[in-house]
Image (cartoon, rainbow, N blue to C red):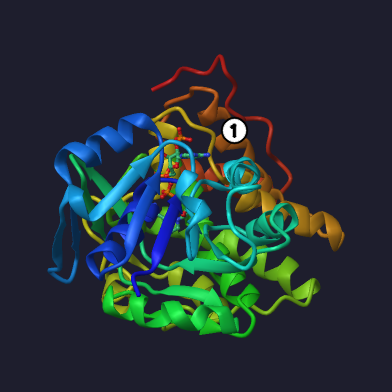
């Protein structure tokens, strides 16, 4: 039987994952903005990856719509909007999606699945996590720029979809409890604000020690509040989270040799937060560094480094196009950590580079 999949949020992740499922035989419908739907309607899809994969999906193999009408008959709904839009997207499914349908949140951050579950209590709502980066090259071409899996929380209702994802080359990594995986992904995603503020591709930014020191400061602070909150992040990389903080501070040559796998990143790949800033959209900073700040408040621990990242991204969201060098950003975060922040805090009147 052909499985019907509605992808709510036709963007980098939704189109890459949904396109792969369509290529594997699913009847996929993309729900998105008119501009994106026109683009994929005109060109079809090209789904490439850093391992040499290059799937073509013709326009006849998928449908598009601006409202999730197809959810009425969908077996599976993938929610792939940014976290700020989760509630609004789930509301659009009310009175459409049928009771018992499986809805998976393929989003970064913690708690998107809870938001969806509260709005769609009759559905089987599962948390998911996409471990790879996808770059939209335009004209329907989406490129997976890093390694990584699609992880999802376990549920018997998932079983009928497991073979489809395997055929699509995205075998599901099923976890009894996805929260430790989500917290571990959040630790990695603390690089998103640093990458976005740097204005550089991921490979170049991660190859520079001062940016990695910024990430190490943000991760060390996050790990401290997580420990206080008794949250134990899963191990998603070869190096466990606590050791990662040390590895990030190594000199460039040593880091590059040790982290050859970690740096298997497409030279053009950037964080999706960088895309958001470039397009003048609100970012997911509140769901990443902001989540650490909230957790710090809950366990009564200060989180000045992540709070500073929230502030700096906020300034960028309001139109500051400054590209921070590694030493400049590191100085900001070290000053925040030592309580000296304020003296050289950028303001709207600072010269915008
Ligand atoms: N990109 C990556 O490499 C990557 C990797 C791992 C995880 N993730 C996570 O995956 C999630 C999706 O990220 P993404 O980069 O794929 O986002 P994206 O490219 O911005 O795609 C989302 C698309 O959905 C549209 N949209 C929002 N609400 C909608 C609605 N109600 N109806 C129809 N369309 C709607 C957005 O339009 P507007 O812009 O107009 O709102 C946007 O075009 C995020 O949580 C992100 O952190 C991303």
Residue appearing at x 67%, y 45% in the figure: 336
Residue appearing at x 27%, y 78% in the figure: 167
Disc 1 on helix, strand or loop?
Answer: helix
Q: Position of residue 179 (x, y in %)?
A: 64, 73
- Nearest the viewer among 210 and 70 is 70
- Above or below residue 67? Residue 315 is above
Given the current orientation, which residue lies at the most extreme top position? 349
Q: Quadrant of the C terminus?
A: top left
Q: Answer with left or right where residue 232 lies relative to residue 181.
A: right
Q: Quadrant of the N terminus?
A: bottom left
Q: Position of residue 199 (x, y in %)?
A: 36, 39
- Nearest the viewer among 224 and 128 is 128
Residue 154: tell me if it is visible. Answer: no
Tell me the residue that label 1 is attached to: 314
- Nearest the viewer among 257 and 113 is 113
- Nearest the viewer among 43 and 292 is 43
Residue appearing at x 33%, y 52% in the figure: 15
Residue 112: tell me if it is visible. Answer: yes
- Above or below residue 112? Residue 91 is above
- Above or below residue 241? Residue 195 is above
Q: Quadrant of residue 22?
A: bottom left
Q: Answer with left or right where residue 224 lies relative to residue 176.
A: right
Q: Position of residue 259 (x, y in %)?
A: 32, 75
Residue appearing at x 17%, y 37% in the figure: 42
Determine crowd level at label 1: few under 14, some 14-19, many 20+ residues with C-alpha closer than 10 A.
some
- Above or below residue 41? Residue 206 is below
């Amino acid at each position: 039987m052909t499985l019907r999949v509605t992808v709510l949020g036709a963007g980098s992740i939704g189109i890459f994952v949904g396109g792969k499922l369509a290529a594997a035989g699913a009847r996929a419908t993309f729900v998105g903005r008119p501009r994106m739907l026109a683009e994929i309607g005109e060109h079809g899809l090209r789904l490439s990856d850093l391992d040499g994969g290059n799937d073509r999906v013709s326009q006849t193999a998928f449908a598009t719509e601006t409202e999730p009408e197809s959810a009425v008959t969908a077996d599976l709904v993938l929610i792939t909007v940014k976290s700020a839009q989760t509630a609004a997207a789930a509301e659009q499914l009310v009175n459409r999606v049928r009771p018992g349908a499986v809805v998976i949140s393929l989003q970064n951050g913690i708690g998107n699945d809870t938001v969806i579950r509260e709005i769609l209590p009759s559905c089987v709502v599962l948390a998911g996590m996409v471990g790879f980066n996808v770059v939209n090259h335009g004209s329907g071409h989406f490129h997976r720029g890093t390694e990584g899996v699609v992880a999802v929380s376990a549920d018997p209702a998932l079983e009928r979809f497991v073979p489809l994802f395997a055929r699509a080359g995205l075998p599901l990594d099923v976890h009894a409890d996805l929260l430790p995986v989500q917290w571990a992904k959040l630790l990695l995603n603390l690089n998103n604000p640093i990458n976005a503020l740097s204005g550089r591709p991921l490979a170049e930014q991660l190859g520079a020690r001062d940016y990695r020191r910024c990430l190490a400061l943000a991760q060390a602070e996050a790990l401290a509040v997580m420990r206080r909150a008794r949250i134990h992040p899963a191990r998603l990389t070869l190096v466990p989270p606590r050791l990662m903080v040390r590895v990030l501070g190594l000199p460039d040559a040593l880091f590059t040799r040790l982290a050859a796998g970690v740096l298997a990143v497409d030279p053009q790949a950037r964080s999706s937060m960088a895309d958001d800033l470039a397009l003048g959209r609100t970012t997911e900073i509140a769901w990443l560094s902001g989540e650490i700040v909230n957790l710090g408040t809950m366990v009564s621990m200060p989180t000045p480094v992540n709070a500073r990242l929230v502030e700096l991204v906020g300034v960028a969201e309001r139109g500051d196009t400054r590209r921070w060098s590694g030493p400049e950003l590191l100085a900001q975060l070290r000053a925040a950590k030592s309580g000296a922040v304020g003296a050289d805090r950028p303001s709207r009147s600072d010269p915008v580079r």
